[in-house]
Image (cartoon, grey):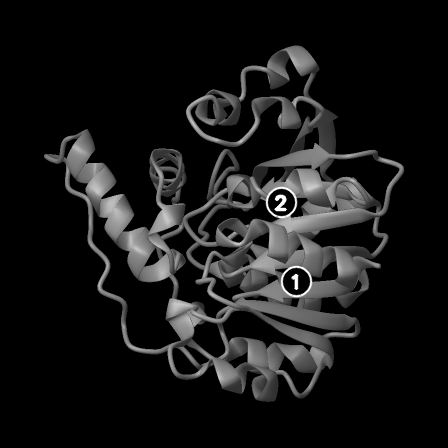
Amino acid sequence: MDEASVVEVSMQEEMAWPALSLLEAGDTRLEAFLGATRLHCTTPMGLQVWHRFGSPLSTPLVLLHGGSGSWMHWLKNVVALSRTNCVYAVDLPSMGDSDVPTGAMDADDLTSSLEMGFRALFKGEPVRVMGFSFGGLCAGLLGASAPQLISELILVGAPGMGLFGPQLKLRGLTPSMDESQVLAVMKHNLKVMMVADDVALDEFTLHLQYKNISRDRLRRRRLARSDVMVQLQTAWTFPVHTIWGELDALYVGRLGEVREKLNRCDLRTHTLIEGAGHWVMYESAETFNSHVQNILK
């Protein structure tokens, strides 16, 4: 496998993050992110952008975000989790600020690129990984391809269980839409798929969603509706934990079957967070962070 290189971005450049200007418009405290470091991981398959929070001397915890997202899916979690771990939140290849690997179409086309990033950052040592939705699918694929790179896996609302409910009625964007129309589409789609409570749909969240979606260059999601995770788990050699929002729109009427589908791996805990939807770590951040910290202990 070709080697990858890692470069840390200086704090002066760090202050120019688009994420920081976004935070000024929301309720999230800007100062909470000033201690972060941005990492550029250059692989033969393109640039990967990672964000590190906490002391590099602490135990690493890697966060893989959801589809059409970026590391900012974890905005309400990185600070709390970095108090006891060194948090590495990546922009998955083809999303956020990371490059598209040549020919990449779906999650299985990202595995080699992710493996290169992991090896470059962690020198082949196994690390804890938490994957949300599409990121959970990516983690499952990586865990089957290179199980030695993962010491423990936390799946959050992960697809690929063969359990998705009816097709969600999401709305699309058109070039003729003005800003108010675009934000109306964002609000509708977030409500339909991502969150259960309208309280979570403030202006900051709508702009965050739009920023993420506008940088998604990996449109195919054939694996998400398959049962690929049921097959992959036989190759996992690490403990697994799961966290779901009890009102996850992707699993309407079938959430109770998740534990049964993960009966061929070392499943340690299975947690449902009351009142939360698919984007559980954002909608119920305090409860979610507490559960994760208990797992990491």
Q: Is residue 57 visible?
A: yes
Where 285 falls versus 179 (above or below)?
below
Which residue appears farthest toward the right when viewing the image? 57
Give the secondary structure at mark 2.
Answer: loop
Q: Amino acid at mark 2?
A: Asn
187 with respect to 255 (left or right): left
Badge 1 local density, few (<14 within 10 Å), some, or many (20+)? many
Question: Residue 25's image quarter?
Answer: top left
Query: Tag 2 or tag 1, which sits nearer the N-term?
Result: 2
Q: Is residue 222 visible?
A: no
- As measured in the structure, the alpha-carbon distance from the residue carrying label 1 to the one carrying label 2 is 23 Å
Report the amino acid beneath label 1.
Answer: Leu
Q: Residue at x 39, y 34 (%)?
A: 204
* 190, 47: nearer the viewer: 190
Specify few, some or many for label 2: CA neighbours under 10 Å numbering under 14, 14-19, or 20 or more: some
Q: Which residue is mark 2?
A: 77
Point 82% across, 44% down: residue? 84
Q: Is residue 73 left or right of residue 127?
A: left
Look at 68% across and 20% down and name the residue there. Answer: 9
Relative depth, front residue between 234 and 70 = 70
